[in-house]
Image: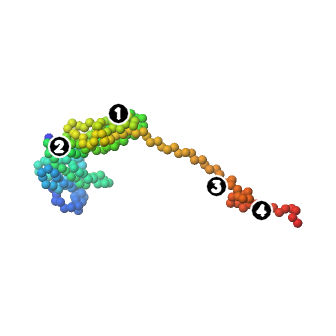
Amino acid sequence: MAASSESKLSLTARPTEGSRAARRLRRKGLVPGVLYGGEGEPEAFAVEGRVLRNTLARAGALLEVSIDGGAGTPVIVKDLQRHPVRDEPVHVDLLRVRLDQPIQSTVSLELVGTEEAPGVVEGGILSQVTLQLAIEALPGDIPDVIRHDVSRMQMNDTETLTSVIPPAGVTLLDDPEETVVATVTPPTLEPVEEEIETETELVGEGEEGAEGAPEGEPAAEAEPSSDDS
């Protein structure tokens, strides 16, 4: 299978000098990486960050890379580390593959038709439980994403992997019965706050002390009798 120009990536060999050298590369806008697998030895490389981002955004799962203008090698991205804040690639691992041998990989699962699902129209909440699927396929048949239509899901429905149809040449490896793909559940009702009666009386009001006066106030002194001599 010939790779398209969007799937080709030119790499530059680099010495393996540790994390300090990797930081210097990143300051120059380069992303360090390692190419390994197959019959060749691991090779450290650097690639321009902008080129890597654009290639990964446009290409499929299979890439063709060359180091310092050498022969093209089919690879897949085995691991891509990103900056926790800027989300930019900071390191990439590429795995050599043979086009005539199936390999195992993971692909993203994308749900379509979520807004049209009857359960959602009725106010239900559709939750995607599984985000990635384990698959096996020839390198050239690995899709960027597997899409699954959930537009028929009713309220309280649960769909498992048995309902997902993979593209031709792709085998799903996850347990079809146990892998839950999506659910539609009724909305959670907000608890109704009970009306709290406003107290109109002060604390202790209406409670009288021993002499009949409100608690906390001294009893009124008796007035002297007019009969006293």
Determine whether label 4 and label 1 are within 8 Å by CB: no
SS for dot 4: loop
Which residue in the protein does label 3 denote?
203
Residue 102 circle label: 2
- Depth order, front residue of 104/178: 178
In the image, which disc is placed on residue 152?
A: 1
Q: Which quadrant of the figure has residue 90?
A: bottom left
Q: Is residue 175 left or right of residue 154?
A: left
> In front: 144, or 135?
135
At 87% from the left edge and 64% from the top edge, which residue is drawn? 228
Is residue 144 at all visible to an observer of this figure?
Answer: no
Distance from Cα at disc 4 to Cα at disc 2: 104 Å
Q: Which mark is residue 35?
A: none
Given the image, on which type of amino acid does mark 4 rest? Glu
Q: Residues within 10 Å of mark 1 (few under 14, many from 20)?
A: some
- Mark closest to the chain's N terminus, 4 or 3: 3
Alpha carbon separation for disc pair 2 and 1: 33 Å
Give coordinates of residue 167: x percent, y percent.
23, 37
The residue beneath circle 4 is: 221
Quadrant showing the N terminus: top left
Q: Position of residue 195 (x, y in %)?
A: 56, 45
Residue at mark 3 to residue at mark 1: CA–CA distance: 60 Å
Q: Residues within 10 Å of mark 4 (few under 14, many from 20)?
A: few
Residue furthest to the bottom:
229
The C terminus lies in which quarter of the figure? bottom right
The residue depicted at 22 percent of the width and 45 percent of the height is: 105
The residue that appears at 31% across and 39% down in the rendered structure is: 160
Amino acid found under the numbered disc labelled 1: Arg
Circle 3 Cα neighbour tier, 10 Å, few/some/many (<14 / 14–19 / ≥20): few
- First in sequence: mark 2 or mark 1? 2
The relative height of residue 222 versus residue 88 in the rendered view (above or below) is: below
Marks 1 and 2: in contact by CB < 8 Å?
A: no
